Image (cartoon, helix red, strand yellow):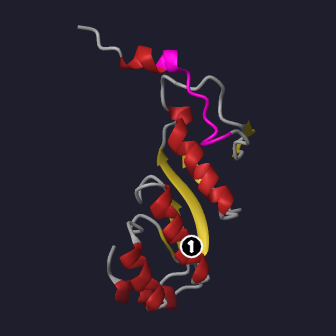
Amino acid sequence: MTDVYGMRKLLASTTMNISLDEAAMGLPYLIELIRREAVEGLVCKVQKVGGVFYARQMCDLARNAGLKLIGSGLMDAPIGFATSVHVFGAYGIDFPADLNGPQHLGGDYLKTPLPMDGQTALVPDTPGHGCDIDEDKVKGELRLEL
């Protein structure tokens, strides 16, 4: 969706919060919507926008413009999932994040599972992404059978 006029009209016609989600592909469109007061929130998907660097730019812009921040993800493998948890934690996103991935993917490559409290993902307190990779599992997965 790149219809700024339509977004502004939609926002003016409802009391519901209007957030940019699937169309949040980069800064130019987000800037245009903010400039035209056509959005109230941003749904951040770290991997969709190209990683931590771009996600932080979008989150910084959204926060500085007074937008609500919501966390979401794609079907992320453990490292991507942990990265999203870190970004969302760093920005204090306290709305429930729509994260999924590792629980739906076969062949986990971690030595220890990511920290969870029931259905709540916790920010790992170990270095880096907080993922302890089982290199033997990775080598086994990557070995080609000829």
Residue wearing tag 1: 60
Q: Nearer the viewer, residue 128 or 142?
A: 128
Q: Amino acid at mark 1?
A: Asp
Q: Residue furthest right?
A: 117
The range drawn in magenta is: 127-137
Q: Residue furthest front?
A: 127
Q: Nearer the viewer, residue 85 or 101?
A: 85
- The structure residue drawn at horizontal position 56% and vertical position 27%, both measured from the top left corner, is 133
Tell me which secondary structure the magenta stretch mostly adopts. loop
Q: Position of residue 121 (x, y in %)?
A: 68, 44
Q: Is residue 48 left or right of residue 61?
A: left
Whether residue 46 is visible: yes
- Is 15 rendered above or below residue 112? below
Q: Residue furthest top?
A: 146
Mark 1 crowdedness (10 Å alpha carbons): few <14, some 14-19, many ≥20: some
Q: Quadrant of the N terminus?
A: bottom left
- The structure residue drawn at horizontal position 41% and vertical position 18%, both measured from the top left corner, is 141
What kind of element bears circle 1? helix
Q: Position of residue 54 (x, y in %)?
A: 45, 63
- Is 104 rendered above or below residue 44? above
Q: Quadrant of the C terminus?
A: top left
- The structure residue drawn at horizontal position 56% and vertical position 73%, both measured from the top left corner, is 60
Q: Nearer the viewer, residue 60 or 25?
A: 60
Q: Which quadrant would residue 129 be assigned to in this image?
A: top right
